[in-house]
Amino acid sequence: MKKLGKITMKDIAAEAGVSVTTVSKILNNVDMHISEATKERVLGLVHKYHYVPNDFAKGRRRRKSNTIGVITYDIADPFISQMLIGVESVCKAKGIGVLICSAISDDASELDNFTFLNSKMVDGIISLGILSSRCKNYVSMIKLPIVAVDREFYFDLPGVGEVVPSALEAIYKTTELLIQKGCREISYIGPSPDTLSSARIEGYFRALKENGRQINEKLVYQNGGFICETGMKGVASLFSEEHADGIVCANDLIAAGAILALSKKGLRVPEDVKVTGLDNISISQYLNPPLTTVDLHGYEVGAECANMLVSWLLDKVPLGKKAVDCEIVMRESV
């Protein structure tokens, strides 16, 4: 047996005096006709040299890697992190590996990630917030099962599963909450319209209309990303001309930035301006004041994505559509 370099199945077979095929059958427990003595001899050498089978090579032969890919637009986003934990928890319990790609929110970066994951021979892909029309042809060509979350589809692609957190319903609820709390001029602060936010602002518009309120475009700020800076810039822009008494924010990070900007202007939350967020990330309860938000259950969303994909991979359960409910978390910013 060679002492330097990586031990191979061929090395194990040579020392055990059997064929490579016999070693493979023993490791995969697929042949009951091999003698117990031979099995013990081979497995003894496997333990002795700490031999680990090459799963990638095995996957190439079987066109199965026992790994799934995940594409996300911002791995640093706390809500994305919650979803990733949900995905990994389910996959780990099933013995399935997870390969994560973080993409800039644009079509080219997304397509690069699909190409990369396909080259790694993943068995399926979960898309956390990204699935654009530009990828339609490629996704159809690779014929991998895909589950997407938090994305309005701009094309009809059969065989794509969906897990939908209730972002539209959540923003509808927070807007209606501010109306019920007596707010007359309600602003919306969110990211640029091309960054997965269409459902959220639709909830804001719908709540205003259904409660008999006029839509004032001067009270709407959409620019930047799902980050604190968007909230700070939103307040600076909106309060230079208008003076809202309520702000609906597209997520908790934006709300955190908005609260900070309001305090710098000498405006009190909630006495002067009431503020709501979305996602219920851990930091929201520690803001000053603690933030009223909506829990989209990020962990459950990720777990549902993984369960749907794994059920297809293991049992061929058809991919479908699953909605995850949301709930308001009342704190002191309203």
Image: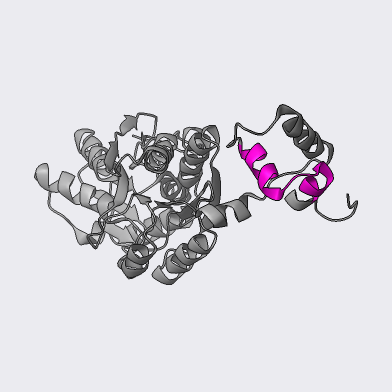
User: What secondary structure prevails in the magenta region?
Assistant: helix
Q: Is residue 213 left or right of residue 12?
A: left
Find the magenta span and give its range: 11-28
Residue situated in front as seen by the camera: 6 or 301: 6
Q: Is residue 229 left or right of residue 292?
A: right
Q: Residue 210 colored magenta? A: no
- Expressed as whole percent of the image width and height from the top left, the position of residue 182 reads 21, 36
Q: Is residue 269 visible?
A: no
The residue shown at (52%, 64%) is 119
The residue shown at (38%, 37%) is 315
Q: Residue 18 colored magenta? A: yes
The residue shown at (31%, 59%) is 221
Residue situated in front as seen by the camera: 215 or 77: 77
Residue situated in front as seen by the camera: 96 or 34: 34
- Expressed as whole percent of the image width and height from the top left, the position of residue 242 reads 27, 57
Quadrant, the C terminus = top left
Residue 52's quadrant in the figure? top right
Q: Is residue 299 visible?
A: yes
Task: Work out whether 314 lies above or below 136.
Answer: above
Q: Is residue 215 left or right of residue 323?
A: left
- Expressed as whole percent of the image width and height from the top left, the position of residue 331 reads 39, 29
